Image (tube, rainbow, N blue to C red):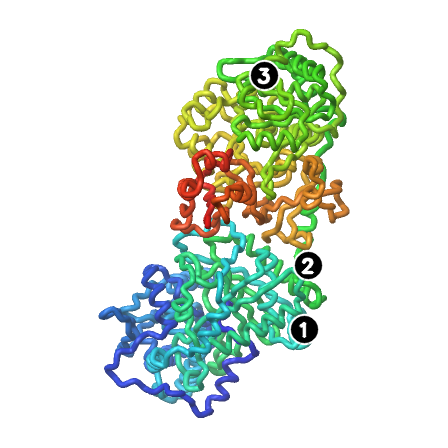
């Protein structure tokens, strides 16, 4: 791996620097410090020392180089040369000790360097290479103790008479990339002298690194430069939400790997020529491409990237070995419409300003600006960029050829680092990445996207950065959609249930508590209800309110409404009366079907109300022919939360729900024998179990009211009725697994979770307790009819972010940016949905519908419209979709979709409230335990109690009062 450290805007080389060595040194006040003076660490060293104390057994701040020496080697000359370099530079013999609360540099007077020697010439070439690599890896993993012992480990390995490897491994606190160039130059100079019969002596430089460290600490901070950084880094420091494959660890391992890509000389030449054409250095252009890549992956417009910079701005420092690296922060604003050329100009200005103000040590910036700190991330940036022009190899004489490269020690200090190297006009790039966060396949794909961006800018630098092609041919193929099959037209969802009643009349269709209803009884009673409704004037396509507590009658009612040719509108009896009235009026419901026990509580509703008991017992209902339902007729209307403060209705057609239901058999492979329905029928996911079970001849077991609060009762019901399938919230299923008896859950063959993000902990728990039960993750907004994406969860998924899966039920899935262009795999985009399951829009709200049900911009599609979900997702490297969060103010609480704006609108109704802000906190990628429980339901109630009565609080919260802490919902952050 040829990974080079150092960041140079202009192409230069160590050789060019050495040719200018004769210039008179300008030390600008750096002078030799008298013996006996306590020498503090430089700022950069202090940072490395601190990190080493945090992770004392981790070698991630080691630096190792391999020198391949081919030809006739004078081993003694080489080792003596190395010892001279060791003697010449005090820093190589330094230790760092903490005394009286302060850390200082101590120089070991012992100049004897211990060098390990190995002879592997008796092995085969392959075996010798393998043995050498094992030695190199072992050396690179040396745990140096900064307070004592040598911080440099040297090994010389003999492979053959004409092939040797020299390994130099040292702690970064004593070296940097430039220093290794100094070391190689001096090593080669001394080696040639020894080979020529000379006896060179160690020549001490005018100043040593400790003199620089003392000077740096004493000179103070440049105030104008500090003011620049305070201005540049003012405001919130955005966290780079680069999609990752694994959850960020609170304590990172810093383990890493890399992916390397070499470019042809022709391609490299075109890129370098482009740099000249647009008057920008290769550093600036490649950095601009990196910014574009990160922007296209994250959609974030404020990006911060770190880049190393050398503090060797004085000639006297050029010959020194030591750690002179510091870091500057490059902050750049981007947008979808900015052209690449304009971005280059912006990045050029940013880098010039940053390098002009580089004399403020990074640690001073952190101290002065005091950003939010975490052991798992850098306070300002999570990505680094480095550009290096590879110098010419040092000459070790005519008989010996040297090649060198840093050794990859399996370390990554940042989430992602991009190294660009230029060697004799040929470019290469390396992505170093944290294996805590990324899989190798993800980085490989990212590297391919980086190359596609390079190809794109060669064709056009004037177009917007969002328009630069990034999709590979494979991705273009994967993005195409096809329909699995179209189901029978002009057939209502209830017709499939009627067919089951003819096939299996005596089979149990419904179970609620101790009550069982056969398919024959279900069908007959539903017919009676339909006839009663028709007698009351119900016509085809009417909307009928259905407000019935959880029971068998609830299913009878909705089926009777469907048979009457109408659409049912489920209204939860637990809703506040104001919400019930609004839904019924907004939907223009013809009548409300309820039950005797609820009639008195619904008297305020300005709508005709009838009890289902009356309809079922109506012996005088005329048994006339039921209306012929068309597949385009509405089957039901579901109301979801609305950003205007009012919920909105989604009419779902028979075609929508038939497609959704019958697609389940194809996806799952078998139908449920017994399904436990946990959801309220006012909740979208209830349609999955209800219709799938009854349309396929299974038994629908309806849970009792509030049974979700009694896990023992749930396990009892599952065992008693031999439940094979169920769908529930991940949080509820986790509770059942934790407290339920696995023996009583053994009948379960299929468990589906939906409505919340599925945590990895649930997956681990599931496969530990019910390994034979298939576990699925489903996703789908109400507008797409229950589900449109699903994934069978595997045990290995517990190690990654659990995906929601791939398209199902004839859904067309698009992940787009703000310009409605497809984003590449791995990048963040907004999810858009098309296909047979898509509703036409919101009930009686054409303007609102037009905002999210938009014309399909893709011609090769069967959908005229696609739905803008507001959900941020990405494709992972396996082609599965991962849910990343919400783009707008909408969240899910206990599986219910709500909009924070709606809660705000309700709270603002009260005169005592002047301002209300409802926030969601969901740091999925930043596990900070102090943040996870910062806002809870108890906090909300405590704040509301200061301003509102208990009655007002209950009215405002309504169905949202039982917030789930696992969702980390912060409701009402400030009332003032």
Spatial CA distance of label 2 from label 3 is: 54 Å
The residue lying toward the viewer, choosing from 958 and 279, is 958
The local crowd at label 1, few if under 14, some if 14 to 19, many if 20 or more residues have their Cα within 10 Å, is some
Q: Earlier in the sequence, mark 2 or mark 3?
A: 2
Q: Position of residue 472 (x, y in %)?
A: 67, 55
Q: Examine the rendered structure and indicate whether residue 594 appears above or below residue 647.
A: above
Under circle 2, the secondary element is loop
Residue 317 in sight from this viewpoint? yes
Residue contact at pointers 2 and 3, CB within 8 angstroms: no
Under circle 3, the secondary element is strand
Spatial CA distance of label 1 from label 2 is: 18 Å
Under circle 1, the secondary element is helix
Q: Position of residue 826 (x, y in %)?
A: 58, 52
Q: Which mark is residue 274?
A: 1
Q: Residue at x 61, y 41 (%)?
A: 806
Residue 138 placement: quadrant: bottom left
The residue that label 3 is drawn on is 509
Q: Examine the rendered structure and indicate whether residue 602 appears above or below residue 369.
A: above
The local crowd at label 3, few if under 14, some if 14 to 19, many if 20 or more residues have their Cα within 10 Å, is many
The local crowd at label 2, few if under 14, some if 14 to 19, many if 20 or more residues have their Cα within 10 Å, is some
Q: Which mark is residue 469?
A: 2
Q: Examine the rendered structure and indicate whether residue 198 appears above or below residue 844.
A: below
**Marks 3, 1: nearer the viewer:** 3
């Amino acid at each position: 791996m040829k990974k080079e450290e150092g960041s140079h805007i202009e192409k230069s080389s160590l050789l060019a620097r050495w040719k200018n060595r004769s210039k008179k040194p300008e030390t600008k006040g750096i002078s030799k410090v008298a013996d006996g003076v306590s020498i503090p660490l430089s700022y950069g060293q202090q940072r490395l020392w601190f990190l080493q104390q945090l992770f004392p057994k981790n070698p991630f701040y080691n630096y190792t180089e391999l020198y391949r020496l081919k030809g006739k080697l004078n081993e003694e000359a080489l080792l003596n040369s190395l010892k001279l370099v060791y003697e010449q530079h005090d820093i190589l013999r330094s230790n760092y000790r903490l005394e009286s609360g302060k850390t200082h540099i101590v120089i070991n007077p012992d100049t004897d360097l211990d060098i390990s020697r190995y002879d592997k010439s008796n092995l085969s070439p392959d075996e010798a290479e393998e043995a050498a690599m094992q030695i190199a890896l072992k050396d690179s993993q040396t745990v140096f103790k900064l307070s004592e012992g040598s911080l440099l480990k040297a090994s010389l390995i003999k492979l053959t008479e004409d092939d040797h490897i020299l390994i130099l491994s040292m702690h970064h606190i004593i070296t940097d990339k430039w220093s290794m160039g100094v070391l190689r130059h001096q090593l080669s100079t001394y080696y040639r002298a020894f080979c020529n019969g000379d006896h060179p002596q160690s020549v001490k430089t005018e100043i040593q690194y400790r003199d620089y460290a003392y000077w740096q600490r004493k000179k103070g901070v440049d105030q104008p430069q500090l003011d620049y950084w305070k201005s540049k880094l003012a405001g919130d420091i955005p966290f780079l939400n680069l999609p990752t494959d694994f959850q960020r660890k609170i304590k990172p391992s810093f383990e890493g790997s890399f992916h390397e890509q070499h470019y042809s000389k022709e391609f490299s030449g075109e890129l370098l020529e482009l740099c000249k054409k647009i008057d920008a250095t290769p550093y600036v252009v490649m950095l601009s491409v990196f910014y574009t890549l990160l922007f296209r992956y994250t959609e974030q417009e404020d990006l911060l990237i770190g880049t190393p910079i050398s503090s060797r701005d004085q000639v006297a420092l050029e010959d020194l070995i030591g750690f002179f690296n510091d870091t500057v922060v490059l902050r750049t604003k981007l947008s979808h419409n900015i052209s690449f050329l304009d971005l280059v100009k912006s990045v050029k200005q940013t880098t010039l300003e940053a390098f002009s103000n580089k004399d403020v040590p990074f640690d001073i910036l952190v101290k002065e600006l005091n950003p939010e700190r975490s052991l798992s991330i850098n306070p300002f940036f999570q990505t680094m960029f480095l550009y290096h022009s590879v110098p010419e190899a040092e000459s070790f004489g005519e008989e010996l050829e040297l090649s060198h490269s840093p050794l990859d020690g399996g370390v990554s200090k940042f989430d992602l680092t991009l190294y660009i190297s230029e060697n004799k006009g040929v470019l290469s790039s390396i992505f170093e990445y944290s294996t805590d966060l990324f899989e190798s396949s993800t980085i490989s794909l990212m590297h391919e996207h980086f190359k596609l961006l390079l190809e794109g800018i060669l064709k056009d630098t004037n177009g917007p950065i969002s328009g630069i092609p990034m999709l590979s041919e494979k991705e273009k193929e994967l993005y195409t959609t096809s329909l699995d099959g179209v189901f029978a037209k002009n057939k209502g969802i209830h017709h499939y249930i009627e067919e089951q009643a003819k096939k299996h009349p005596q089979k149990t269709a419904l179970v609620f508590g101790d009550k069982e209803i056969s398919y024959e009884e279900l069908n007959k009673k539903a017919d009676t209800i339909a006839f009663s409704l028709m007698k009351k004037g119900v016509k085809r396509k009417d909307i009928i309110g259905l407000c019935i507590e959880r029971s068998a009658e609830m299913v009878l009612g909705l089926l009777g409404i469907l048979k009457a040719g109408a659409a049912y509108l489920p209204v939860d009896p637990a809703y506040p009366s104001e919400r019930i009235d609004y839904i019924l009026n907004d939907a223009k419901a013809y009548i409300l079907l309820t039950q005797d026990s609820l009639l008195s509580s619904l008297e305020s509703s300005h709508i005709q109300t009838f009890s289902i008991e009356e309809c079922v017992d109506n012996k005088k209902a005329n048994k006339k022919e039921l209306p012929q339902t068309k597949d385009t007729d509405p089957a039901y209307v579901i109301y979801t939360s609305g950003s205007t403060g009012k919920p909105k209705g989604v009419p779902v057609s028979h075609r929508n729900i038939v497609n959704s239901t019958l697609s389940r058999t194809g996806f799952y492979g078998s139908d449920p024998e017994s399904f436990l329905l946990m959801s309220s029928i006012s909740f979208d996911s209830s349609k999955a179990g209800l219709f799938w079970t009854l349309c396929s001849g299974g038994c629908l077991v309806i849970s009792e009211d509030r049974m979700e609060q009694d896990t023992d009762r749930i396990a009892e019901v599952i065992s008693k009725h031999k439940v094979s399938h169920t769908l529930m919230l991940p949080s509820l299923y986790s509770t059942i697994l934790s407290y339920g008896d696995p023996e009583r859950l053994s009948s379960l063959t299929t468990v589906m979770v939906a409505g919340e993000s599925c945590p990895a902990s649930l997956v681990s728990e599931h496969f530990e307790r019910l390994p034979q039960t298939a576990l699925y993750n489903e996703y789908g907004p109400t507008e797409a009819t229950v589900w449109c994406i699903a994934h069978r969860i595997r045990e290995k998924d517990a190690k990654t972010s659990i995906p929601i899966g791939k398209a199902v039920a004839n859904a067309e899935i698009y992940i787009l940016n703000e310009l409605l262009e497809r984003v590449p795999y791995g990048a963040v985009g907004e999810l858009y949905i098309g296909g047979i399951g898509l509703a036409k829009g919101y009930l009686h709200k054409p303007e609102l519908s037009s905002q999210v049900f938009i014309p399909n911009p893709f011609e090769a599609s069967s959908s005229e419209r696609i739905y803008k979900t507001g959900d941020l997702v990405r494709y992972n490297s396996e082609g599965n979709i991962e849910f990343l969060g919400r783009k707008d103010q909408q969240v899910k609480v206990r599986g219910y979709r709500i909009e924070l704006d709606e809660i705000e609108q309700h709270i603002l109704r009260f005169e005592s409230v002047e301002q209300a802000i409802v926030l969601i906190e969901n740091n999925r990628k930043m596990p900070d335990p102090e943040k996870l429980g910062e806002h809870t339901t108890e906090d909300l109630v405590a704040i509301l109690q200061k301003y509102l009565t208990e009655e007002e609080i209950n009215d405002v919260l309504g169905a949202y009062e039982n917030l789930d802490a696992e969702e980390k919902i912060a409701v009402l952050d400030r009332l003032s």
